[in-house]
Image (cartoon, rainbow, N blue to C red):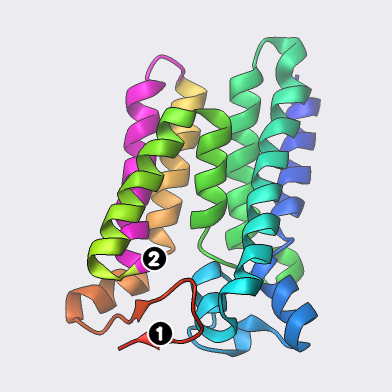
Amino acid sequence: MWYPILITVLVSYLLGNLNGAVLMSSLMAHEDVRSHGSGNAGLTNFARNYGGIGSLGVILVDGGKAVLACLLGGLLLEPYGMTLEGMTIGGLALMIGHDFPVLLGFKGGKGILSGCLIAFTIDWRIGTLILAIFAVIYLITGYVSLGSVIASAAFGVGFAIFHHDNLVVMICGLAMGVLAVFMHRSNIVRLVKGQERKTNLFKKGSKK
């Protein structure tokens, strides 16, 4: 059983290294999105600098790799009766690879987009919960980071509520939620200080 788990972790981590924002900025402008704005390789920084059309490509890449990692883990561990566990392990490894990609100098994104698709793939109830929370917070405040932080907390809580009877799934879910909040630590500081920027995800440029 440890062999398929190892394959799941390794392949999912490497899939995480395929960053949609870095790929699309390279294809569209022959440059690295991390050289602009916040320096983050995520959808928000990409949208601020390149606009909404290219953002669709980022969503497809980062969302697609998340679904693929979960399906791979589920498939490899299905013979052991651990499909859900395999999906969650694959999701966690994918998020670590996205946040800390060895092939990109350990400078990746924050995992919100990938995390959302991971949640939907594993349990649509959790995916719906965090997407709804993010959308409401973002539409009311205009702060992507605030919506992301609260949705990340809900991510972990959702796994604790819906999968409290499966220790592996619950722990991996909580770990993904904590990791997503941790990756937003600088945003949290700026929000507290009133220095965070608002963002229009569908239009180039950011609100002041």
State the residue in front, 156 or 205. 205
- Residue 96 position, x and y percent, is 59, 53
Calculate the distance from the C-alpha at mark 1 to the C-alpha at mark 2. Answer: 18 Å
Helix, strand or loop at disc 1?
strand
Asked if residue 54 lies in the magenta stretch, the reply is no
Q: Which residue is pictured at 32% across the width and 42% down the height?
A: 154
Amino acid type indicated by mark 2: His
Question: Is the residue 127 above or below the residue 167 in the image?
Answer: below
Q: Residues within 10 Å of mark 1 (few under 14, many from 20)?
A: some
Q: Earlier in the sequence, mark 1 or mark 2?
A: 2
Whether residue 192 sits left or right of residue 105 in the image: it is left
State the image quarter where residue 100 is shown.
bottom right
Q: Quadrant of the N terminus?
A: top right
Label 1 belongs to which residue?
206
Q: Which residue is pictured at 31% across the width and 48% down the height?
A: 133
Q: Residues within 10 Å of mark 2 (few under 14, many from 20)?
A: some
Q: How many marks?
A: 2
Question: Is the residue 43 above or below the residue 151 in the image?
Answer: below
Mark closer to the observer (1, 2)? 1
Amino acid type indicated by mark 1: Ser
- Residue 107 appears in view: no
Label 2 belongs to which residue?
184
State the residue in front, 120 or 179. 120
Magenta span: predominant SS is: helix
Whether residue 196 sits left or right of residue 29 in the image: it is left
State the image quarter where residue 163 is shown.
top left
Asked if residue 163 lies in the magenta stretch, the reply is yes
Q: Which residue is pictured at 50% across the width and 38% down the height?
A: 119
Q: Which residues are drawn in magenta? A: 144-166
- Residue 47 appears in view: yes
Helix, strand or loop at disc 2?
loop
